[in-house]
Amino acid sequence: MDQAMIEFQSVTKQYQGGQPAVDQLTMSIDRGSITVFVGPSGCGKTTSLRMINRMVEPTSGVITVDGRDVTSVPAAELRRSMGYVMQSSGLMPHRSVLDNIATVPRLNGVSKAEARKRATELLDVVGLASALGKRYPSQLSGGQQQRVGVARALAADPPVLLMDEPFSAVDPVVRDELQQELLRLQKDLAKTIVFVTHDIDEATILGDKVAVFAVGGRLAQYATPEEILRAPANDFVASFVGRDRGFRHLGFTTSDAVTIHPVPTLVMSAGRFAGDPAAVTDWQLVVDPDLRPLGWARPGTDSELIPGGSLFRPGETLRRALDSALSSPSGQGVAVDGDGKVLGTVRAQEVLGVIEEARQVRQAAL
């Protein structure tokens, strides 16, 4: 089976009297992968995305999707065959959440009952409570609206999903949640996703491959995130990626060398601690009866539950290990297994030590 799902062949977009918005773009986008277009404002990344579904028509060159020239398919039909998520969610304010999600299946001739059933299923898929289906977009938070936008894009089960800066309008915490949700969805659904962002961090978190565009609509580098961080193709890519790419590289270095320590635990059931929390002389991890972490108990307190930081799973990256330790009130990152049960903790200073060793190994290899 051909690996390429989308092909650009010498594609140029020239607006009258101006410089090319996209200049001789040639690239292959792998089937079932996330490809991120990244670059500064005005570099042609959004124009390139919109040429895939003919929201923008190329001046010259050929774009194929699954082997078919996109110009051979009527534009409206082509757009209904792909999911599309934009920055502002683009939901219709006068329609309920369920009816927004059901839009494309209805346009494709699916009955109202079937379309709504599919919409209800998709609320769960994108992590929203079914009760939200009856609300209107104005009654949702920005992050919830974006999840509805993703659900709507998935409603007709399209093989291709186009995402134009979909998370840039939400706050950083919600943005991180949405990024992780997209990665979880992709693991289950294996769509061909083309994602536009101006944020190199977002690009390296999400992309199986990253296309860095330079001003003038030229493709400056197209490679895995790790390769772009390790070996920028030219000065433009190096400056765009930034000087802290050594830290970003932690996103690709496994945490196998980090020690996981035993941690004392307090069990909380029905809102009460089992045992005597007042006797706690050091930080203790509070868990539910199934040993899933709930937070921390501070030394000398009797009932206060302090929320913990992010969780970490062995085998994840050094960046995730460090994030879990630095975000924890106790300075200890909580390691959990695949079922979310506590395995122990990692310590920030030890993670930093492993990071320094990894940095020295990289330096020696250069």
Image: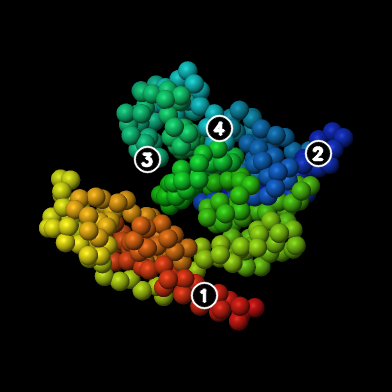
In the structure shown, which secondary structural element does the residue marked by tag 3 occupy?
loop
Which is more N-terminal, label 3 or label 4? 4
In the rendered image, is residue 3 in sight? no
Residue 148 percent location from the top left of the image:
45, 33
| Residue occupied by mark 2 | 14
Name the quadrant of the C terminus: bottom right
**Mark 4 to mark 3: distance in Å?**
19 Å
Q: In the picture provided, is 180 more to the left or to the right than 20?
A: left
In front: mark 4 or mark 3? 4
Residue 140 is tagged as: none
Point out the frontmost of discs 2 and 3: 3
Q: Nearer the viewer, mark 1 or mark 2?
A: 1
* Picture disc at residue 356: 1
Measure the alpha-carbon separation of dots 1 and 2.
Answer: 48 Å
As drawn, the residue found furthest toward the top would be: 94
Which residue in the structure is indicated by mark 4?
88
Secondary structure under the numbered disc 1 in the rendered image: helix
Among the 4 quarters of the image, the one containing residue 134: top left
- Considering the numbered disc 4 on the image, is that residue within a helix, a strand or a loop? loop
Residue 7 in percent (x, y) is at 66, 49
Given residues 46 and 353, the one toward you in this image is 353
Q: In the image, what residue occupies the spot 39% across and 30% down?
A: 119
Which of label 2 and label 4 is nearer to you?
Answer: 4
Residue ID for mark 3: 127
